[in-house]
Amino acid sequence: MKNYVVYLKCIDITNDGQGICKKDGLVIFVKEMLIDEEAEVKIIAEKKNLAYGIIDKLIVPSKYRQESLCPISYKCGGCDFLYVDYNYQLVLKKHILEQTFKNMDLNIKINDVIGADNPYEYRSKVQIPVNNHEFGFYRKYSNDIVEFDNCYIQSKLSNDIFKYLKEKLLNLRIDKYIRHILIKHCFGTNEVMLCLIVKDFNIPNIEELVNDIIIKFNDIKSFILNLNTRNDNVILGNEEKVLYGKNYVTDIFDGIKFNISLKSFYQVNYEQMRKLYYLAKDLADVNDQTKLLDLYCGIGTISLFMARFCKDVVGVEIVKEAIENAKLNAEINGIKNATFYLDDANNEMDKYLIDKDVVIVDPPRKGLNDKLINSLINSDIKKIVYISCNPATLARDLCKFEGYFSFDTVYPVDMFPNTKHVETVVLMSRVELVV
Ligand code: SAH
């Protein structure tokens, strides 16, 4: 049965931010419903013991509910919590983390989430799909494009560039060549990389577009075409062509210069990145004798940030462009005690672990594989600082370290305000066997 309306009270929230209600043995997940809210809910899908609903009429709103700034946030897949007061978002994220770790039987304290001073206009990278003359973000769980005029979590400059570019592409009738628009905006220097991911390098009037936009926005220091003729979900293709400027942009973070190529990862929230890195440094408790290994090092941001406080640092990363950036970044900053290797962290890591005191791991959402976990357990490493963007895989991995490393606190940092995502840091210390 579906499409009927029931009166429900929300009692909890799921990991991905949906309200949880219960009625007559049925668990009902309701989109955008906050704890303690009461509403008439329309059931849109029902299975044996569970159902999905949407609010038909909100009867008792939460005091933490606010008007979303964004007229399309209810359908765009980007933001989950724009309708929630920011401080309460932090409370919810802490609560979600508590549930995640409790479900894994991990007895660990979750600290308060370190919030952002400005939960808007923080993102430094945006990828916008283009299809059938439409420019926007994907609707949740779909490939439909939801168009937007202004994205409230993107920087103002990238919004301005996007709006201008969209008009130009439409006027020149060349939008059909474009699959994605990618903009990287460095908050420390204001440098911008603009990349069009295209189906064909030969685009009529593209020079006209480039000449126009670099005059209009002189912060654009790199204009790249990236060719992607594949038919999958991967955004970037292999070949690229620089139409203007450099094939990278340069940011300055905490006094260090970072060159960032198209394919290299860079944290999307500049302000929170500082809080994250200083937190990691404090937990790692490094000093001028510390030998540090930074796994999943990207362009060497953490490595070079830490190198100033350590004896030496080694960074390992799988993306070639990123490790090239990292090596050059050490050089342009005159940092001599950092070395970088192109390698897959799923390969044998033992050789990098020899003689190290502290390891920082900052893996992608899927977390660490068992081989690496075993190498870390069997090494002489005393301390691991685990930075994670996915609490579920962090909790899973921590269970595997239990007995070998001890940990008592999760330190969350809100790198992604207004979305359900949260970054966390955990310090793991070697359990010393008493003989
Ligand atoms: N610590 C960096 C990057 C973190 S993002 C920073 O703070 O900027 C995770 C990084 O892991 C990305 O650069 C990604 O390219 C890299 N990566 C993904 N899988 C990997 C693997 N199997 N081995 C090594 N690096 C990997």
Image: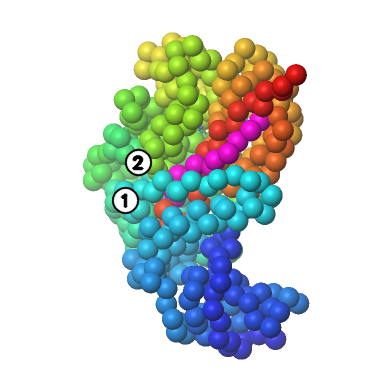
Quarter of the image where the N terminus is located? bottom right
In the image, ligand 1 is in what quadrant?
top right
CA gap between label 1 and label 2 equals 9 Å
* Residue 334 quadrant: top left
User: Which residue is the site of mark 1?
Assistant: 118
Q: Residue at x 48, y 70 (%)?
A: 34
Kind of residue indicated by mark 1: Asn
Task: Indicate left or right for 85 with 365 as reference.
Answer: left
User: Which residue is the site of mark 2?
Assistant: 271
The vertical placement of 337 against 187, above or below, is: above
**Residue 342 is at least partly visible in this image:** no
Q: Residue at x 41, y 60 (%)?
A: 88
Q: Which residues are magenta?
A: 405-416
Along the polypeptide, which appears first: circle 1 or circle 2? Answer: 1
Disc number placed over residue 325 in the picture, else none: none
Element class at badge 1: loop
Q: Position of residue 261 (x, y in %)?
A: 45, 32
Kind of residue indicated by mark 2: Glu
The foreground one among 339 and 290 is 290
Q: Residue at x 71, y 79 (%)?
A: 25
Query: Mark 1 Cα within 10 Å, few/some/many (few <14, many 20+)?
Result: few
Task: Indicate left or right for 48 with 80 as reference.
Answer: right
* Residue 318 quadrant: top right
Q: Position of residue 351 (x, y in %)?
A: 68, 15
Q: Position of residue 357 (x, y in %)?
A: 57, 17
Q: Position of residue 285 (x, y in %)?
A: 47, 24
